[in-house]
């Protein structure tokens, strides 16, 4: 995507270097437009090397290509970070005496600003009135956060962190077709303890489930994400999303309880977690030693099938989605197994994905088929786990009617 990042003259400009890096790493084309003042904080070479694009502040360069309007026209998203009180006032007035000013007037793309200033300046009626005007015009105001400011004082005025700005700004582009929908999503893999240091677990990283939660929330849904043993780095984006509440669960029993509670008022239940089918019959108080002989064979008892029980007690109109990870020999056999599983669990939709020693779990990409009423294949999706998540929500949205 073509993204313009406007940088204005505040010390938080140093954090915007990281924002640009994150956007580039996520595969976007970024043009940085600093104001003259911004260059007093972070210099032009830094912006050019980090964005891999030429950078200028002036409307008098590259005139042949009408750069002063071309950048705004080509942009699919404009982020101004940091946005100083001065820049916010200039945006309200529509001033166009530098390249950022003309670009902001020429663009029809969504615009997000991340204010950064001292608390007194943020609270001043002039700034508050300007912010209200930008908000009315459809500009997204991201932050500011409360926290320590450069003068050692603290209060609202701190620029949001680069990750938060990126997530919120990219979220503006998502279609809000799930606005207000309440959903419960489980993700990750349960761990069934054997003793204080050992457990029976599985290789689920939680990435597909987290992507499902993020995709729903970006489309406007209110999500409860029940996360079972997911690494912080995988969970981070969801944990800071304003529409996602993360609840942690360790074992199948804990995950079952959390999902039952979250499902009470959910319109859609998505069970993407890999739940252990069995748990050790007994959990030892102390670490089991080889000498005890108790590790030679472990007695297991079956866990409740959570998704089947949620499906059995669902209220009218509630949609229940299960996942099936299969290691198939051939595609037809995989589909036949998936169809049987959908029937057995009594769910509306079953998402089947192929896993093996080297695909599925930790991978960033996925390939799935969505099976619905009568065993019909409603969709095939492949690509990043986020793309796959969006395709799955498309099918769910259709089922909701
Ligand atoms: N699941 C569940 N509770 C369990 C086990 C699984 O809710 N105790 C859910 C998973 O979250 C997933 C779906 O059931 O949505 C598929 O799980 P899977 O283990 O593949 O199904 P099983 O019925 O256990 O079939 P298999 O014998 O192939 O393992």
Image (cartoon, grey):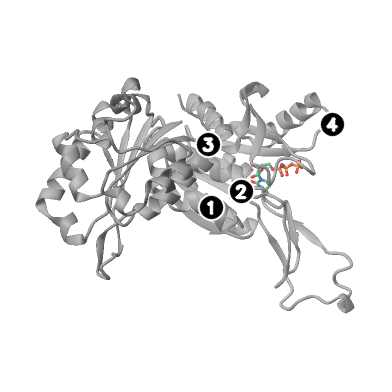
Q: Point out the image quarter for the C terminus.
A: top left
- Who's the residue at 59% across and 48% down the image? 187
Q: Provide the secondary structure element on which disc 1 rests.
A: helix
| 359 or 170: nearer the viewer | 170
Q: Is mark 1 within 8 Å of ligand 1?
A: no
Numbered mark located on residue 329 in the image: 4
- Among the two numbered marks 3 and 2 on one chain, the one whose residue lies closer to the N terminus: 3
Residue at disc 2, secondary structure: loop
CA gap between label 3 and label 4 equals 35 Å
Distance, label 1 to label 3, CA atoms, is: 21 Å
Report how far apart the C-alphas of labels 3 and 2 lie in the structure: 23 Å
The spot of residue 61 in percent (x, y) is: 31, 30
| Label 1 packing within 10 angstroms: few (<14), some (14-19), many (20+) | many
The reply to whether the C-beta atoms of the residues labelled 2 and 1 are less than 8 Å apart is: yes
Q: What whole-number distance in Å separates the C-alpha atoms at marks 2 and 1?
A: 8 Å
Which mark sits nearer the N-terminus, 1 or 3?
A: 3
Q: Write down the residue under mark 3.
A: 27
Q: Quadrant of residue 107?
A: top left
Q: In x, y percent, where is residue 274?
A: 67, 48
Number of other residues with Cα within 10 Å of mark 3, as a class: few under 14, some 14 to 19, many 20 or more: few
Q: Contact, CB < 8 Å: mark 1 with mark 3?
A: no
Observer-nearest residue: 308 or 116? 116
Residue 366 percent coordinates (x, y): 66, 35
| Residue denoted by label 1 | 235
Residue 334 vertical position relative to residue 38 in the rendered view, above or below: above
What residue lies at 36% left-to-right and 52% top-to-bottom?
A: 42
Q: Quadrant of ligand 1?
A: top right
Q: Which residue was labeled with disc 2?
A: 206
Q: Are marks 4 and 1 in contact (CB under 8 Å)?
A: no
| Extreme-left residue of the structure | 125
Percent across and percent down for residue 246 are: 48, 54
Mark found first going from the N terminus, 2 or 4? 2
């Amino acid at each position: 995507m073509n993204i313009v990042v406007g940088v204005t003259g505040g010390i938080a400009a140093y954090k915007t270097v990281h924002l640009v890096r994150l956007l580039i790493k996520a595969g976007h084309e970024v043009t940085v437009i600093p104001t003259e003042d911004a260059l007093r904080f972070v210099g032009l070479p830094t912006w050019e090397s980090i964005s891999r694009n030429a950078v200028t502040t002036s409307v008098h360069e590259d005139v042949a290509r009408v750069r002063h309007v071309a950048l705004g026209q080509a942009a699919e998203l404009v982020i101004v970070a940091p946005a100083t009180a001065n820049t916010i006032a200039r945006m309200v007035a529509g001033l166009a005496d530098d390249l950022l000013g003309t670009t902001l007037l020429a663009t029809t793309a969504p615009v997000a600003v991340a204010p950064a200033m001292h608390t007194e300046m943020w609270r001043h009626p002039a700034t508050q009135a300007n912010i209200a005007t930008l908000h009315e015009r459809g500009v997204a105001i991201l932050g500011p956060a409360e926290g320590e400011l450069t003068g050692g004082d603290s209060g609202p005025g701190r620029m949001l962190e680069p990750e938060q700005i990126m997530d919120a700004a990219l979220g503006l582009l998502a279609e809000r077709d799930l606005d207000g929908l309440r959903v419960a999503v489980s993700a990750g893999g349960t761990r069934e303890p054997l003793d204080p240091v050992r457990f029976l677990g599985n290789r689920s990283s939680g990435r597909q489930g987290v992507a499902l939660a993020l995709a729903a929330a970006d489309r406007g849904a209110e999500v409860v994400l029940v996360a079972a043993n997911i690494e912080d780095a995988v969970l981070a984006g969801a944990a800071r999303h304003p529409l996602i509440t993360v609840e942690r669960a360790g074992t199948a029993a804990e995950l079952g309880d959390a999902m039952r509670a979250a499902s009470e008022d959910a319109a859609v239940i998505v069970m993407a977690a890999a739940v252990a089918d069995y748990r050790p019959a007994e959990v030892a108080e102390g670490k089991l030693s080889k000498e005890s002989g108790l590790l030679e064979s472990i007695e297991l008892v079956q866990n409740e099938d959570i998704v089947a029980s949620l499906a059995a007690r669902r209220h009218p109109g509630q949609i229940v989605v299960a996942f099936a990870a299969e290691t198939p020999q051939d595609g037809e056999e995989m589909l036949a197994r998936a169809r049987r599983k959908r029937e057995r669990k009594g769910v509306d939709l079953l998402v089947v994905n192929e896993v093996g020693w080297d695909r599925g779990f930790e991978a960033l990409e996925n390939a799935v088929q969505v099976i619905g009423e009568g065993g019909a294949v409603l969709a095939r999706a492949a690509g990043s786990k986020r793309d796959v998540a969006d395709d799955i929500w498309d099918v769910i949205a259709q089922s909701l009617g």
